Image (tube, grey):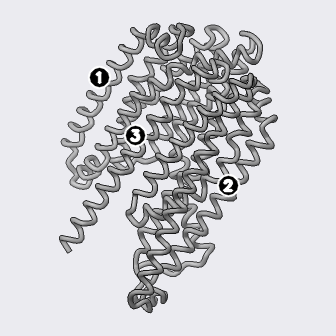
């Protein structure tokens, strides 16, 4: 028994390490690709892309995050040999549900692009919305398969598919930007081409997962043919069951109850970005024509990838606190919990503060080095100050999750999004994009304080 427990623990740690490494690579690629996007397309294309992408990210999160985790949980609970049919049923139900959501959101993005663009305040967004739409038809099935393999404690397919998806997305985006630029395409079409990269990446990620699924089904078939299959193929009797029998409706309801809170808890960070999507273009309307406004949005977004590098590091390090905090809470050691919290907050504050100070002081040379001119350096300096509270938000979110308060971080970020909405409305008409940057600092500061 001890051997089995140690083996399972080792497998879980290895799987967590694989997923963490893949997440780091994909996030790093996702952030760094914004530099060639701005260099090739210019600030107008950069602004259009960064206006559309938060809404796309929100829809992907709603479609997949909760159900992928729910599939992993349900598959992990049904590992007995006689439950193969139930595992398949869980996968089918989750895939169908996510696919329905994906189709609905894809239709919204593609056919609703003119309406969404009008709501945001710029017709230049239409090609970008339509370029991203096909990805929502492909991502759901890939997410369901990822959850299935994660439920079997096999994290490699998820990790490989995520890295391949991101690599193809970035490659296709850059190739299309270069090709369309040479053809003299308009900024709106260049941004649409950049978002097509998301659909190409989603197709590549799904292809990788289907290859893993094909290998898994073949090996399962070979095992059944090689050995006694009667026990594996026949459903368990009620006496041997650890879980009660469920109808399809009950199983779907159980999946939904697990998926919904996870999906809602994942919406916090996309919501803050979404505030700028739906407020900046209209609030900047007095600052020029549509393309000039999008260029201003692009300049505002120059500093965000740099801040995200800091918060990515903080998020990666903060994950280490989750199991430690959970263990201390189980032991009831409140003194150790307090010391751990104080230590974590001190270190993350110092890391974030050092990063903010460095980025703010070097805003102009960094701006010229990465984006080829000094436009918006003052705004970049203000954006830099979101790194300090952003690092604290990453730390406090991990600490709260480790203590079992899973919903608290999402509620704090929701409050921050509401504050940013109000401050944008007050500051942007007066200060332009610098006002949006100041609002961001205040919003993340409030989230960290909560």
Asked where in the image residue 196 lies, by quadrant, the reply is: top right
First in residue order: circle 3 vs circle 1? 3
Q: Nearer the viewer, mark 3 or mark 1?
A: 3
* Precedes in sequence: disc 2 or disc 1: 2
Towards the viewer: 157 or 445: 157
Q: Which residue sits at x=40%, y=15%?
A: 359
Residue that carries the numbered disc 3 in the rendered image:
24
Closer to the camera in the image, 423 or 178:
178
Residue in front for this viewpoint, 257 or 36: 36
Looking at the rendered image, the disc whose residue lies closer to the viewer, 2 or 3, is 3
Q: Which mark is residue 101?
A: 2
- The reply to whether residue 407 is in sight is yes
Q: Earlier in the sequence, mark 2 or mark 3?
A: 3
Secondary structure under tag 3 reads: helix
Q: Are marks 3 and 1 in contact (CB under 8 Å)?
A: no
Task: Point out the image quarter for the N terminus.
Answer: bottom left
In this rendering, position of residue 121 left or right of residue 167? right
Residue designated by label 1: 350
């Amino acid at each position: 028994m001890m051997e089995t427990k140690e083996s399972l623990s080792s497998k879980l740690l290895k799987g967590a390490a694989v997923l963490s490494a893949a997440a780091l690579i994909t996030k790093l690629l996702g952030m760094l690709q914004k530099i060639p996007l701005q260099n090739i397309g210019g600030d107008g294309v950069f602004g259009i892309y960064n206006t559309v992408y938060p809404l796309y990210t929100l829809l992907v999160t709603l479609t997949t995050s909760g159900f992928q985790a729910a599939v992993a949980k349900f598959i992990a609970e049904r590992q007995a040999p006689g439950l193969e049919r139930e595992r398949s049923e869980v996968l089918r139900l989750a895939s169908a549900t996510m696919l329905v959501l994906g189709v609905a959101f894809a239709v919204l993005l593609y056919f609703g692009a003119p309406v969404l663009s009008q709501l945001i305040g710029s017709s230049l967004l239409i090609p970008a919305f339509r370029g991203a739409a096909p990805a929502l038809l492909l991502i759901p099935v890939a997410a369901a398969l990822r959850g299935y393999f994660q439920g079997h404690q096999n994290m490699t397919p998820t990790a490989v598919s995520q890295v391949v998806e991101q690599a193809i997305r970035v490659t296709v985006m850059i190739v299309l930007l270069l090709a369309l630029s040479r053809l003299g395409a308009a900024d709106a079409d260049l941004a649409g081409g950049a978002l097509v990269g998301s659909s190409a990446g989603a197709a590549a990620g799904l292809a990788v997962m289907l290859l893993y699924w094909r290998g898994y089904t073949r090996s399962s078939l070979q095992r059944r043919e090689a050995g006694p299959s009667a026990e594996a193929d026949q459903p368990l009797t009620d006496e041997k069951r650890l879980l009660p029998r469920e109808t399809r409706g009950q199983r779907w309801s159980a999946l939904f109850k697990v998926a919904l809170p996870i999906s809602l808890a994942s919406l916090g960070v996309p919501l803050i970005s979404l505030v700028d999507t739906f407020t900046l273009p209209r609030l900047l309307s007095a600052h020029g024509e549509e393309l000039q406004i999008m260029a201003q949005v692009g300049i505002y977004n120059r500093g965000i990838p740099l801040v995200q590098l800091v918060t990515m590091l903080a998020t990666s390090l903060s994950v280490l606190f989750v199991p430690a905090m959970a263990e201390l809470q189980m032991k009831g050691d409140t003194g150790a919990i307090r010391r751990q919290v104080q230590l974590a907050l001190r270190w993350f504050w110092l890391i974030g503060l050092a990063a903010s100070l460095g980025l703010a002081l070097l805003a102009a040379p960094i701006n010229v080095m990465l984006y080829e001119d000094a436009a918006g350096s003052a705004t970049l300096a203000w954006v830099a100050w979101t790194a300090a509270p952003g690092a604290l938000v990453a730390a406090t979110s991990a600490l709260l999750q480790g203590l079992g308060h899973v919903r608290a971080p999402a509620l704090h970020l929701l409050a921050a999004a509401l504050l940013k909405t109000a401050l944008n409305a007050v500051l942007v008409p007066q200060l332009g994009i610098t006002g949006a940057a100041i609002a961001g600092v205040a919003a993340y500061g409030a989230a960290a304080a909560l």
